[in-house]
Amino acid sequence: IEVDAIDALVSFFEDLSGNLSLSSPVSGWIRTSDPCESKWTGIVCYDQTPSVKSITFESFNLSGTFKPNTICSIPSLATSIVFISLNNNNLDGENLEAVSNCKKLTHLYTSRNRFSGILPDSLSHLNNLKRLDISNNRFSGSLSSLPRISGLIEFIAQNNQLSGSIPEFDFSNLVTFNVSNNNLSGPIPPGGDLFTAASYLGNPQLCGDPLPNPCESETQRATPPNAAENSDDRKKSGPNSAEILMYSGYVLVGLGLFLVIVIKLCKKGTKKEELVEEGDNHRSKEDVDASQTPTFASNEFRSVAMSKSEVFAGNSVESGPVSSSLIVLTSPEVNGLKFEELLKAPAELLGRGKYGSVYKVKCEEHGMTLVVKRIKDWSLPSNDFKSRMKRLNHVKHPNLLPVVAFYCSKQEKLLVYEYQPNGSLLKFLHGMPTGQTFDWSGRLGVASTIAEVLAFMHDELHQDGIPHGNLKSSNILFNKNMEPCISEYGLMAINNPDNSPAIDIVNNTSQLNPDQIESAFRADIHALGVILLELLTGKRPMVQNNGMDLAKWVVSVVKEEWTVEVFDRALIREGASEERMVNLLQVAIKCVDRSPDSRPSINQIALMINNIKEEDERSMDVSESPFEIRN
Ligand SMILES: Nc1ncnc2c1ncn2[C@@H]1O[C@H](COP(=O)(O)OP(=O)(O)OP(=O)(O)O)[C@@H](O)[C@H]1O
């Protein structure tokens, strides 16, 4: 790295750090060392060229000033830095408009600081920006220029003092958008209703869909003059009371529908009520006759569903309040599948997990095989479940298995996925027929993909408080191209490896406070660490011979300096690089750290694993040269 860039970085950090002592030790950041070679804290460099890729100082208690001009005026830094995160410090800013000279920036995170003043217009020159988080500061001014950033997929700006109207963003491109608790006013622009009211609440002068208060012209049209007082009252009492009114309406509609269904069922006579036992399910005789083969449908599910067999295709999940018999199909591939067909189709029990049973269901007419997961006793209220489904449906990643349909009632919830023909990572690692191997580069590829998907999902769903909650090797499935996909994101109770009383046996994130949600995300990191350990050791995550779980066992062996002992013999035999296995092991051990706060962030983990993978790929290229000696 050039001297002027090093000088600029050191001055930049001096300005950031302020006078207070930092919450974590920082190494490097002196003029006599190189940021990439000496691995300065908070700096990540590119592998191929020694230049700075990202600067991350999250929760360091930095109390100085963010002066982007110091780094963004140096061409080599301005053209290399893509990621800056200064979340959760005590920073203020100076000459913030200069950040627009860092033209390559894709991520800019400045949440939870003391930034104030007008949000610089020049941010709109950051053409590559994908994610911008300025939440929880004191920024003022308008948002008018931001829609010019065409590729923006995340804009998080709640809890500031922003004013003026909301401009016309390309909402269909945004996956996260939150401007709640500002001073914004006027109507929510077209497309803004793709997000829920939570994205807009706390701006008393904002109106229109999805907020409960219509805009003035609409109010005048809808309410007689003598009702104006009432509508004012409603505004004063705040959106919560209005929301309550709205939801009460939904409840009434739901009750109405429920009554209709019950009456219809009664009219159908008692024939259907003759139940026969089948395993732990009660099924009607008629149903048993209809399909001699076992199906997955419980009587409760079947009776409600059969009385109202509907297929709701495409984005019907968006269409507002729904009755408890609703099944929503969100994938074009399953579009057109009749609900009865799904119910009657032959089903094979794949397993009974902690939270329910999983069935493979063959819908022959459609040439499709689906998987239905039946969860019992998940206390998440139906409305919360539906809004969670809606949110999850917005977040897509090619290596994340989406829910293609769902059903919910108070007693049970059904989730439908496409069947993945190549089994799970658990099976791949621990149930391979002898003679077959799962080689090092394959394992490293899986590790890097899972970390990348998890980083993406955490990024997308952190605001919503939705972690995976049940990440494990049986939930990593190989698709038809043998690519690993994470399944069951955000659907289950929260794993609690730390046995923290804070999140003990809670299965409804909406009941968690922010600290508990944070713990839940950190529990995902622990779970990822266990998967990395399974990949490295080839051992199951369960209790080992001596009564320890895998993480404890690995940590104890490494402490005794017998590190090589932990690796899967197959990897050693294959001649996998010991150095890179140790590097991955170090990442895994950090992930399973007993103190959740000491675990690295998912973005750091994804970067570290990716670096190991890139190094591995490079070494393979070079090793093809006859002069190369492999380590
Ligand atoms: N979409 C799918 N395609 C193929 N196999 C699947 C699919 N979903 C789940 N499975 C497999 O079905 C089996 C049972 O799944 P289940 O989710 O019940 O297991 P689990 O992950 O051990 O339990 P739980 O998630 O309830 O803790 C597992 O082997 C899983 O890999």
Image: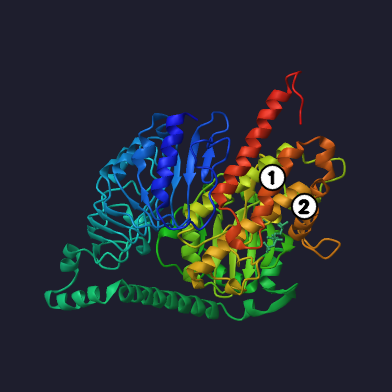
Residue located at (54% from left, 28% from top) = 49
Count of numbered tags:
2
Q: How is the image coloured?
A: rainbow
User: Does the closest atom of ligand 1 sit within 8 Å of the Cβ of label 1?
Assistant: no
State ligand 1's quadrant.
Answer: bottom right
Q: Position of residue 475 (x, y in %)?
A: 67, 55
Q: Nearer the viewer, residue 210 or 299?
A: 210
**Mark number displayed over residue 558:** 2
- State which mark lies toward you, 1 or 2: 2
Q: Position of residue 28 (x, y in %)?
A: 53, 43
The extreme left residue here reads 225
Whether residue 612 is situated above or below residue 549 in the rendered picture: above
| Residue 593: quadrant of the picture | bottom right
| Residue 494: quadrant of the picture | bottom right
Whether residue 549 is situated above or below residue 589 in the rendered picture: below
Label 1: which residue? 584
Query: Visible in this render: residue 177?
Result: yes
Whether residue 57 is situated above or below residue 407 in the rendered picture: above
Type of amino acid at the residue the image marks with label 2: Val
